[in-house]
Image: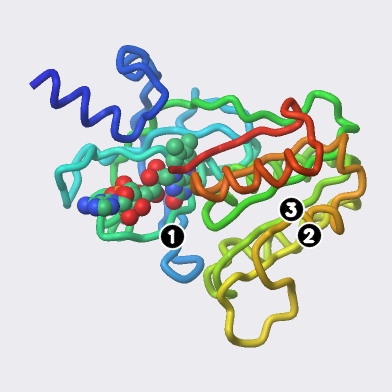
Amino acid sequence: MCVAQVRKISYDIKSIDVKIFYMIAQYSTTVAQKNKIAENTYQLLITKPDDFSFVPGQYVFLDFPNPIYTDDKPSFRAMSIASAPHEKYLMFVMRGSDSAFKRNVMESNEGDPILVKGPMGHIALPQNVNQPIAFIVAGVGITPARAMIKHEEYQKTNRQITLLYASRTKNSIALYDELRNISLQNYKSIFTLTREEGEWEGSRGRIDAEMIRQNIDDIKNTMYYIVGTKIFVESMKEILEDLGIERNNMQFDNFG
Ligand SMILES: Cc1cc2nc3c(=O)[nH]c(=O)nc-3n(C[C@H](O)[C@H](O)[C@H](O)COP(=O)(O)OP(=O)(O)OC[C@H]3O[C@@H](n4cnc5c(N)ncnc54)[C@H](O)[C@@H]3O)c2cc1C
C-alpha cells in the first residue's frame, strides 16, 4: 500500500521528496470558471484562498477531492499559476486529454470543490528591475510567462521584455490577444507557428538562434525563461549555450 502510494506520487512530482510533498500547504477552494480558450485548451479560474500567496512563476498541484473520473494515475497534476498575484482568481491553462484529471477539468463547473497544494518552484523575476528578460516558450509553457508578464505590467516596469512563443497553429495559441496587447512600452511579443497551413501574419517555424538574435537586443545580459516540454527546454538550452549565454542567466520550467 505504502509502496504504491510512493510510486503514484513520484509519477508527477519528479524532484520533490515524498515527505516534503505531505508537508506542502493545502488549500480547499472552488472552481470559479472554466473556459475553452483555444483549440483543445482550457482555462480554469479558481477562487483564490484568502491566505494563499505566491510569486509569479510558481506552480501548484491541483486535485479534485470528489472526482467524476478516476484512472490508474494520480488524481493531481502540477500546474503553473498563469495569473499574477494582484489578479482576482488563480488562473490555470492546460491542454485537454483523455486522462481522468483532464476530463475532470473539462467537465468542471462553477462551485466544484478543488484542492490547491503549494505554491512551489524557484523561477523568479530578477531583482534588478533594469535587467532585460525574455520568455522562450512553447504551447502551454506560456503559463508562468503570462504570470510574470502581467506582474511586470502591473508594476509598470521599464525593462525590455521579449516573448518568443511557439505554437503549432493559429487556433492553438493560448491567450493570443491578451499577450499581444500588454501595455508596457518596452514589451515585444513574437508568435511563431510550426504547423499552420493557412494564412498567418506572424513568424513561422521553430524558435532558433537566428530568431533569438533578431529579437533580443542585449542578448548577453538578458535573463531567459525557457518553458515547455522536456525536448523543447533541452533544445532551447543548447541554442542559448551556443549563443554564449551564461548559465546563471537562464531559468527553466520543464513540463515533462
Ligand atoms: C512544474 C510544472 C508545471 C506544469 N504546468 C503546466 C501547465 O501550466 N499547463 C499544463 O497543461 N501542464 C502543465 N504541466 C504538465 C502537467 O502536470 C501534466 O503532466 C500535463 O498537463 C499532462 O497531463 P495529462 O493528464 O493530460 O496527461 P497524463 O495522463 O499525465 O500523461 C502525461 C504524458 O504521458 C503520456 N502518456 C499518458 N499515458 C500514457 C500511456 N499509457 N502510454 C504512453 N504515454 C502515455 C501522455 O501522452 C502525456 O504526454 C506542468 C508540469 C510541471 C512539472
Q: Amino acid at mark 3?
A: Leu
Circle number at residue 211:
2
Circle number at residue 42:
1
Q: CA distance from mark 1 to mark 3?
A: 21 Å
Q: Secondary structure at mark 1?
A: strand
Whether tag 1 and tag 3 are in contact, CB under 8 A, the answer is no
Q: Give the quadrant of residue 155.
A: top right
Query: Which numbered disc flags the more N-terminal residue, 2 or 1?
Result: 1
- Confirm if mark 3 falls within 8 A of ligand 1: no
Q: Residue at x 73, y 71 (%)?
A: 203
Q: Amino acid at mark 2?
A: Met
Q: What percent of the width, then of the height, locates residue 254?
A: 51, 39
Up/down of 25 relative to 37, above or below: above
Q: Amino acid at mark 1?
A: Tyr
Q: Residues within 10 Å of mark 3 (few under 14, many from 20)?
A: many
Which one is closest to the eye, mark 2 or mark 1? 2
Provide the residue designation for mark 3: 163
Q: Is residue 42 left or right of residue 156?
A: left
Q: Quadrant of the C terminus?
A: top left
